[in-house]
Image (cartoon, rainbow, N blue to C red):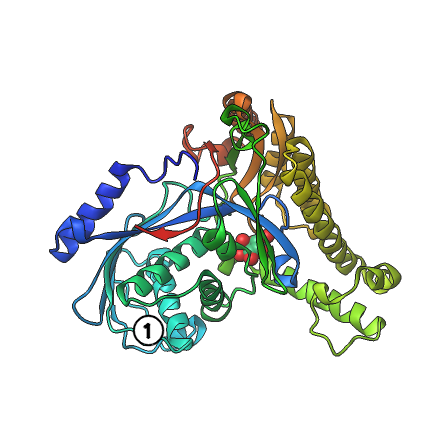
Amino acid sequence: MGAMCWPSESELNVIRTKVAEMSGRDSKEVKVVESPYRICPLGAHIDHQGGVVSAMTIDKGILLGFVPSDDSQVLIQSGQFNGELRFSIDEPQLPRSAAESNNSGEVKSSSSSHEEFSWGNYIRGALYALQKRGNHLKKGIIGFISGAEGLDSSGLSSSAAVGVAYLLAFESANNLVISPSENIEYDRLIENEYLGLKNGILDQSAILLSSYGCLTCMNCKTKEYMLIRSPELNGNHTNDVMKKFKILLAFSGLKQALTTNPGYNQRVAECREAANILLHASGSKELEPLLSNVEPEAYEKHKDKLDPNLAKRSEHYFSENKRVIEGLEAWESGNLEKFGKLISASGLSSIQNYESGCEPLIQLYEILLKAPGMYGARFSGAGFRGCCIAFVDADKALDAASFVRNEYRKIQPELASQISDDGAVLICDAGDCARVI
Ligand code: GLA
């Protein structure tokens, strides 16, 4: 456990007081789910192909205060969105595409914007996942959910943090004992089936498994994971690797939800198409078309059969897998310089091979690479919007943050003006896994 400063007692009290008001219960009865945001230093965009990924959480995230209801009713309000959501847990949940054609959304809001109307999808998705796996829920929850200001839709996986928070709250209210591995699968049902995003299991694995001081490593094909502890160089805390770096979050000002951006699912389809061609060429066409089913030697032998775009997506997959493996060793031996270089190389591959960036994010990445004390940087999350993450020397973090803020403002004045000066670059520490307190 590190010296965690999130959530603060005052943040928790705000949530507890709010839920006490909503439910008429004593604030001491209110439980809070802490569900942190995640970063993926190495392993971008290979989880959906069954690759090996690395991840950790940061000391910021989603808080969901709740009490079990007396009956099956759910009542939820949000700190970021207007309106409130009411429904019964006895209602069978359908994937969103089916539910929308039945016109069943019911967030009551003074505004009819799509975003406000749809914030309730995650709690319904959590219920969908629990129902689908045969859990019998008796109690709803009365709850209030709140994310860190300005960090939604930023590529830190606020959506998985929200999904996990609702799962943990329903499970706690109904005394269900569900393992982290099962919850990884439940969150997959929310994202892949309920919301229709073809993503992998990186986000929820990071949120559910991470432990301060460790790098989480998940094999997305076998679902086996390891927590790789950083070395304390000589047992003296001032030499602890965890104290030698800070995580910078540098925001581009671009926001767009993944489920409304076709880029993500399109890249997944391209990877599958490439896998299909390579598997056919290497005589393994019976295997599911995932790049993790293609042996690296078969890729080398048959890559000339891929058109240029599919060749680039595959090159990203195979080179990123190698970077993850090298990165795990670098982390374990406390070699932050090497770890950082691999992160920046991963960022470059996202730009050149996976082509998931956009101009402002690429500019931000390039600025970060020039910042004082920089170990390494890359886009966060899907990389179509949101922020870049960077590992930076702890002693130079403040200088790096102001360098990045100033340089980005010079080349993207309009986007930069949409972010407050305080919020443009945040300095964070690593975090822990999601939990109910
Ligand atoms: C999003 C997806 C993840 C993963 C990352 C990119 O966060 O939800 O499954 O693919 O993008 O690494």
Q: Choose top left, top right, bottom left or bottom right for residue 333.
A: top right
How many residues crowd around disc 1 within 10 Å: few (fewer than 14), some, or many (20 or more)? few
Kindly identify the residue that appears in the image at 38 percent across and 62 percent down: 122
Going by the image, does 161 lie left or right of 18? right
Front-lying residue, 108 or 53: 53
Quadrant including the N terminus? top left
Mark 1 CB within 8 Å of ligand 1: no
Front-lying residue, 306 or 415: 306
Amino acid carrying label 1: it is Ser
Kindly identify the residue that appears in the image at 75 percent across and 50 percent down: 319
Going by the image, does 353 lie left or right of 331? right
Kindly identify the residue that appears in the image at 62 percent across and 50 percent down: 44
Q: Is residue 368 visible?
A: yes
Residue under pointer 1: 104
Q: Choose top left, top right, bottom left or bottom right for residue 391.
A: top right
Residue 375 percent across, percent down from the top left: 63, 30
Kindly identify the residue that appears in the image at 75 percent across and 71 percent down: 276
Q: Is residue 251 above or below residue 290?
A: above
Residue 37 percent across, percent down from the top left: 45, 47
